């Protein structure tokens, strides 16, 4: 969230006149477990309240698995609850989530079948897969990198991802989700992964940026942002 989304917005500034500031409030987590994710989500209201003090123009809840581990379809309830927090503080603000953005982004490019890479342990990755399937998207193949330490997720080398995607079943999918986690970097690997698989490639960070730009009513063309941020959607 704090690296790739600002990087995408900086890239957009090179092609468009709008300028952005970035503000964050953190929910604590050290290990990506269901228990710590639930504790994170309980803290999300505090974060929304703090950010609404700054009168930001859009908020993004940037932990995909925290949302998806709370139950099927939870991104809708979460976004409304956090928007209500901001409104009650006198600063109504649209709220998007990486979970909802990824689902919407996949559907927007017309993808019905996907392959997916996630850093989580297998049980949590299965929760993510089931959540996406419940939204009407077929997850044909998936890989769990089984990294439980949150800082290790952020330190994962994105250069590894194209080869991981290459080894997956992608011939009969419509798109590849190279990182179903805003914490795991993948942006630098997106062009190579698209070249290797011949498919549109997106990530949680790309989808969240797209969703934020849509909420702001801005053009969604971001150089280096892959198919979803080509400006066509």
Image (cartoon, helix red, strand yellow):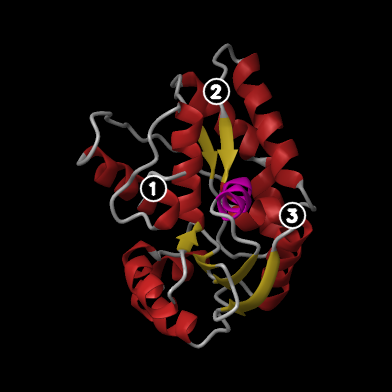
Identify residue for label 3: 135
- The spot of residue 139 in percent (x, y) is 68, 70
Question: Which residue is under mark 1?
Answer: 5
Relative to 46, is 13 on the left or the right?
left
Query: Magenta span covers which residues?
Result: 99-108
Position of residue 112 measured from the top left corner of the image (x, y, whole percent):
65, 62
Seen at 60% across and 78% down, the residue is: 172
Task: Give the residue displayed 39% in from the left and 40% down from the top.
Answer: 220
Gap between marks 3 and 1 measured at Cα: 24 Å
Q: Is residue 201 above or below residue 121?
A: above
Residue 104 located within the stretch drawn in magenta: yes
Q: In the drawing, does residue 54 fall left or right of residue 145?
A: left
Foreground residue, 67 or 186? 186
Q: Would you call the spot at circle 3 few (<14 residues within 10 Å), some (14-19), or many (20 or more)?
A: some
Q: Is residue 1 visible?
A: no
Q: Residues within 10 Å of mark 2 (few under 14, many from 20)?
A: many
Furthest residue in direction bottom, as rendered: 167
Q: Position of residue 115 (x, y in %)?
A: 59, 73
Q: Earlier in the sequence, mark 3 or mark 1?
A: 1
Q: Nearer the viewer, mark 3 or mark 1?
A: 3
Q: Main secondary structure of the magenta part?
A: helix
Secondary structure under the numbered disc 1 in the rendered image? helix
Of the pair 221 and 34, the residue shown nearer to us: 221
Residue 51 position (above or below residue 87): below
In the figure, residue 47 lies in which quadrant?
top right
Measured in 3D between alpha carbons, the distance from the residue under mark 1 to the one under mark 2, in whole angstroms, is 18 Å
Q: Which mark is residue 93?
A: 2
Which sits in the foreground, 156 or 151? Answer: 156
Residue at 55% x, 84% y is: 168
Q: CA distance from mark 2 to mark 3?
A: 25 Å
């Amino acid at each position: 969230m704090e690296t790739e989304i600002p990087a995408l917005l900086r890239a957009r500034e090179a092609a468009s006149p709008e300028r952005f500031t970035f503000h964050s409030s953190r929910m604590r987590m050290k290990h990506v477990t269901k228990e710590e994710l639930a504790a994170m989500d309980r803290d999300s209201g505090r974060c929304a309240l703090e950010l609404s003090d700054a009168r930001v123009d859009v908020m993004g809840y940037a932990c995909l698995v925290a949302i998806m581990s709370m139950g099927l379809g939870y991104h809708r309830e979460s976004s409304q609850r956090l928007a209500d927090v901001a409104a009650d503080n006198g600063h109504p603000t649209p709220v998007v989530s990486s979970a909802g953005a990824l689902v919407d982004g996949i559907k927007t490019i017309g993808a019905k079948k996907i392959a997916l890479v996630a850093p989580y342990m297998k049980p949590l990755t299965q929760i993510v897969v089931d959540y996406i399937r419940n939204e009407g998207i077929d997850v044909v193949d998936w890989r769990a990198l089984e990294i439980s330490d949150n800082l290790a997720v952020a330190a994962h080398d994105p250069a590894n991802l194209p080869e991981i995607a290459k080894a997956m079943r992608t011939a009969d999918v419509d798109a590849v989700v190279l990182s179903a986690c805003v914490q795991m970097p993948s942006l630098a690997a997106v062009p190579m992964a698209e070249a290797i698989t011949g498919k549109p490639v997106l990530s949680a960070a790309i989808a969240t940026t797209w969703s934020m730009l849509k909420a702001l009513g801005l053009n969604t063309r971001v150089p280096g942002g892959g198919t979803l941020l080509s400006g066509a959607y």
